[in-house]
Amino acid sequence: MARTGRPRGFDKDQTLLCALELFWSRGYGATSIQDLVDALAVERGSLYGAFGDKRRFYLDAVRLYWEVYERHLTSALDTTPVLPALREILTHPARLDEISTELGTPQGCLVGNTTAELVPHDSEATEVVTRSYRRFTDIVAAALRRAQASGEVTDSARPEDQAQLLLYVVQGLSLVSRAGLDRAAALAAVDTAIDALRA
Amino acid sequence: MARTGRPRGFDKDQTLLCALELFWSRGYGATSIQDLVDALAVERGSLYGAFGDKRRFYLDAVRLYWEVYERHLTSALDTTPVLPALREILTHPARLDEISTELGTPQGCLVGNTTAELVPHDSEATEVVTRSYRRFTDIVAAALRRAQASGEVTDSARPEDQAQLLLYVVQGLSLVSRAGLDRAAALAAVDTAIDALRA
DNA sequence: TGACTTCTTGAACGCACTGTCAAGAAGTCG
DNA sequence: CGACTTCTTGACAGTGCGTTCAAGAAGTCA
């Protein structure tokens, strides 16, 4: 085995998490390396050594974001009845309590933000968001399938189509909310969607 | 009256329209002044003279975009029955046939793109998109109100809430579609939404 | 201890971008 | 025609960015 050298002076995972929050709140383009250096208390060279260039760094943050979100999504939907959990998920777009406890959502859904900023021009980003969307619909469709079987959700539409629609709703809500969230109106709209799923 | 000087060597409206297409397909940050100079065949100084700085120029383009879209939206919904028109609007997010005849949609909805890129950090952009969203929901809610009265659309939810939900759907579809549009899946999801509105 | 490896630091490089400006061109009007 | 105004042109300044790199620091292992 190769000799080990000087150990890293910072926690890589923790640093990625902090970077995630910064990228999340400011976006990819608007977050400069200098911003990261200041916020993370890690010098430029060390960041490049640990994470490669800015794009890689960002995409790693997005992947981490999705990982956490997917865990949240899966565990939330693993209940009966399904609709209350679904409502919760739509209402707090990309809540990610595990990451950001105080602010709720820094700025919408990071996957959605990435879509708007880098897709389709950046092919690697496109892959990441495409896979994320796919997993979202797969997980939600599976939950809806169970709920249809139990009679909780209407079977007047295919679960996949319902799930795709819910993806649009959660991404649309997440995006539109950046312009100022009228909580009551958003909630009423989400309830309208949820009610439409009821058997 | 002041003496008039040398007349402009280009059509301001036409130039704004071309700039709109460029901004639409590349986004605000990714479109440089030089890109505009090359595409519009107008020198930098002239652009600055006619439109002010880049941000003003962009916001003017967004306002024009919305103007055209709103006309399209209003006239499309001025029919009976309403649901087929609504389906058309959701299916072709930001179609804007008047502007872009060949490509359909360069890149989603420009208002949504603006939301993702400049909102809420830029207050003027926030105003523009907020007003646009508001007008969308107002127009759609009015159409739904008529459709509820005529018995075409279910009155199990308030038209405003249905309209807000449709705003989320169209913006979500527009965003998610950047990652690659599965036309059949998108259509099925939209149909699911439309069917849920049926009385 | 000493050879070796890796990490840290911060200055420096090259580049692209927005916005400005002075000189000249092209009109209008008395 | 000649004074005046506005537009055009393209070079320029100023800034901020991502990335690199050489020198030194801090570990590990024989």
Image (tube, coloured by chain):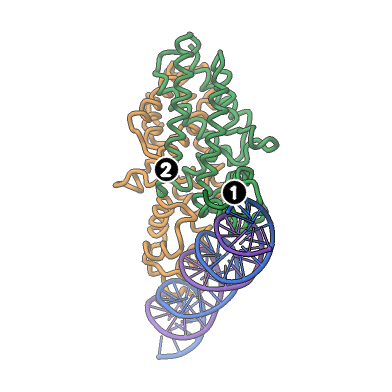
Chain colours: A orange, B green, C blue, D purple
Residue B26 is marked as 1
- Label 1 or label 2, whichever lies nearer to me, is 2
Numbered disc 1: secondary structure = helix
Q: Amino acid at mark 1?
A: Arg
Q: Nearer the viewer, residue A181 or B145?
A: B145
Q: Residue at x 49, y 49 (%)?
A: B56
Q: Is residue B70 visible?
A: yes
Q: Residues within 10 Å of mark 1 (few under 14, many from 20)?
A: some
For mark 2, name the chain: B
Give whichever of discs 1 and 2 has the lower sequence position. 1
Numbered disc 2: secondary structure = helix
Q: CA distance from mark 1 to mark 2?
A: 20 Å
Q: Is residue A122 visible?
A: no
Q: Is the residue A47 above or below the residue A82 in the image?
A: below
Q: Is the residue B48 above or below the residue A170 in the image?
A: below
Q: Position of residue A49 (x, y in %)?
A: 49, 68
Residue B126 is marked as 2
Q: Position of residue B75 (x, y in %)?
A: 57, 23
| Quadrant where the C terminus of chain A is found in the figure | top left
For mark 1, name the chain: B
| Quarter residue B126 falls in | top left
